[in-house]
Image (cartoon, rainbow, N blue to C red):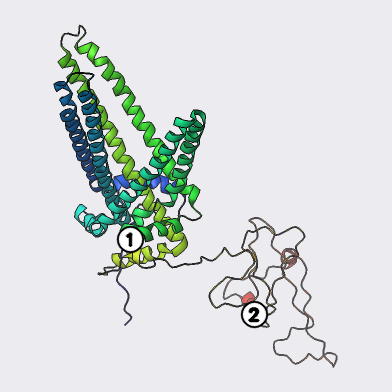
């Protein structure tokens, strides 16, 4: 007996097709990922970002109140007053800077969780937060280190340029202003150039478990030839969510300016008006925070999709993902991570076969002197090209079927039978069995006319006419 393989259902589709896709797919499916697993993506990001925002605001506000409250103990305008004012400002700024770095570290962790979850969503998996964190945890310090390195490089570059511009302004005002404007434009161009190049670093660190500097080099190579599409994704998402944040913040700012006049029109109860303004601002900031969380998730998702598309085009990652999905759905266990199977390999995809060329199968070689393949059915022929001649049929092969005639068309007249070869002796046939008699009249060219002229000789069975 022949053993047939067990039936397995079709593989579940992920958030993107398992083949190279384009700019529109990356941009559109970045929003689709939010619906795939909102508990892990939006819920985790919103909680972490909200906690970080509340802690940052409370800490900076507490330090500012504690430091600036000392100004009440000294007279205004004295040397102690100026020293306390400057020291309080430095302490508050340093606190905000340190806590801002900590908040950035939390943001990069959120981005890492999004990257890991979207990598599962590509192969139609919906993991829990624990499973996603198990993938991020071994490389979390690399993510934080990369974020700190990026921040440090930004601070150093801006600080050096700011120092140069300040010295020039002190000496020659117009030269300092001109250098400052050119430096600002140069920083914008540098940011727009480096952002696509470094866009895939978190994805490489998490999915390939690479270190910081190899991940930077790897992101640089994968985005080669895809600079403008990657920059377009980054700019469109950033501008779109910036507009949404402004749409939310502007109405709340207007309401916050009106609330004091409504709650305390005479100015006798400023406490109630202050509480109302704070409440409006808190609601507005929560809306802006929600928009920022969605923007972080969408931009991180787009980074993963750009990474997957780049590897599909260069390293045939789509074949590894498709193999993984088929084996998983067939019940296989202990499968290798598909994102680690073909890291760094180069796969040359075959060019499209032109019309009339033989198929480019591996090991195929056209025989010498062979004619090219005929073009596909329906492909128009160039003007003046000779018509294709049908190949000769071998002797004894059945005739090719004739094309069907349209309904109502007159039937074609049958060809007359070939006359027998003349005998060498007059009056004697050629000796072939069943040879036709010489006294049979030749068939007419119109069978219908012959049938009308011939008499009907039908008789009932058993009669004399049937003998």
Q: Are marks 2 and 1 in contact (CB under 8 Å)?
A: no
Judge left or right: residue 433 versus residue 151: right
When asked about the image quadrant of residue 38, the answer is: top left
Cα separation between marks 2 and 1:
52 Å
Q: Position of residue 361 (x, y in %)?
A: 54, 73
Vertical comparison of 159 with 345: above or below:
above
Horizontal side, residue 354 vs residue 286: left or right: right
For this rendering, which residue is in front, 204 or 407? 204
- Which is more foreground, mark 2 or mark 1? 1
Looking at the image, is mark 2 or mark 1 earlier in the sequence? 1
Position in image of residue 59 (x %, y %): 18, 35
Does 139 appear above or below 2? above
Residue at image point 42% right, 48% down: 26
Which image quadrant for residue 274? Answer: top left
Q: Say which of 423 and 343 sits in front.
A: 343
Which residue is label 1 attached to? 211
Q: Position of residue 237 (x, y in %)?
A: 40, 40
Task: Answer left or right for 413 relative to 407.
Answer: right
Q: Does residue 279 appear in the picture of this structure? A: no
Task: Give SS at disc 2.
Answer: loop
Classed neighbour count for the residue bearing mark 2: other residues with Cα under 10 Å, few (<14), some (14–19), many (≥20) = few
Count of numbered badges drawn on the protein: 2
- Residue at the far left in the pictured view: 73
Residue 164 in view, yes or no: yes
**Which quadrant, please, contains the N terminus?**
bottom left
* Residue pictured at 60% horizontal, 75% vertical: 463
Label 1 CA crowd tier, 10 Å (few <14, some 14–19, many 20+): some
Q: Position of residue 35 (x, y in %)?
A: 30, 45
> Disc number at residue 431?
none
In this view, 295 is above or below 381 = above
Identify which residue, 183 or 388, lies in the foreground.
183
Label 2: which residue? 367
């Amino acid at each position: 007996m022949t053993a047939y393989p067990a039936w397995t259902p079709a593989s579940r589709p992920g958030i993107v097709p398992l083949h190279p896709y384009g700019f529109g797919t990356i941009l559109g499916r970045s929003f689709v990922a939010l619906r795939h697993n909102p508990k892990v993506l939006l819920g985790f990001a919103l909680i972490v970002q909200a906690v970080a925002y509340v802690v940052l605001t409370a800490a900076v506000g507490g330090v500012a109140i504690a430091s600036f409250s000392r100004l009440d103990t000294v007279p205004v305008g004295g040397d102690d007053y100026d020293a306390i004012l400057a020291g309080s400002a430095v302490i508050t700024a340093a606190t905000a800077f340190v806590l801002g770095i900590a908040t950035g570290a939390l943001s990069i962790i959120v981005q890492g969780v999004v990257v890991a979850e979207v990598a599962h969503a590509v192969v139609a998996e919906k993991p829990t937060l624990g499973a996603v964190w198990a993938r991020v945890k071994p490389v979390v310090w690399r993510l934080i280190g990369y974020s700190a390195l990026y921040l440090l490089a930004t601070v150093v570059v801006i600080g050096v340029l700011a120092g140069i511009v300040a010295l020039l302004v002190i000496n020659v005002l117009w030269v300092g202003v001109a250098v400052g404007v050119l430096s600002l434009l140069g920083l914008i161009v540098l940011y727009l150039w480096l952002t696509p190049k470094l866009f895939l670093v978190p994805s490489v660190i998490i999915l390939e478990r690479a270190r910081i500097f190899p991940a930077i080099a790897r992101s640089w190579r994968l985005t080669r030839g895809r600079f403008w599409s990657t920059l377009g994704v980054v700019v469109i998402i950033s501008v779109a969510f910036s507009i949404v944040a402004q749409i939310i913040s502007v109405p709340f700012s207007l309401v916050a300016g009106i609330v004091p006049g409504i709650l305390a029109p005479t100015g006798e109860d400023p406490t109630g008006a202050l509480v109302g303004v704070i409440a409006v601002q808190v609601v507005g900031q929560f809306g802006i925070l929600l928009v920022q969380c969605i923007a972080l998730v969408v931009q991180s998702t787009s980074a993963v999709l750009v990474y997957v598309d780049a590897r599909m085009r260069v390293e045939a990652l789509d074949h590894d993902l498709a193999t993984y999905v088929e084996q998983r759905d067939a019940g296989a266990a202990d499968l290798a991570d598909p994102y680690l199977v073909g890291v760094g390999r180069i796969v040359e995809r075959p060019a499209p076969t032109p019309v009339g060329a033989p198929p480019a199968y591996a090991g195929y070689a056209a025989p010498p002197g062979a004619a090219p393949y005929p073009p596909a059915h329906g492909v128009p022929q160039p003007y003046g090209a000779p018509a294709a001649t049908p190949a000769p049929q071998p002797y004894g092969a059945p005739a090719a079927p004739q094309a069907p005639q349209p309904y109502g068309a007159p039937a074609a007249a049958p060809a007359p039978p070939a006359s027998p070869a003349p005998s060498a002796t007059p009056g004697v046939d050629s000796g072939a069995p069943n040879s036709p008699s010489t006294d049979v009249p030749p068939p007419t060219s119109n069978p219908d006319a012959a049938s009308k002229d011939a008499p009907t000789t039908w008789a009932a069975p058993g009669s004399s006419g049937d003998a």
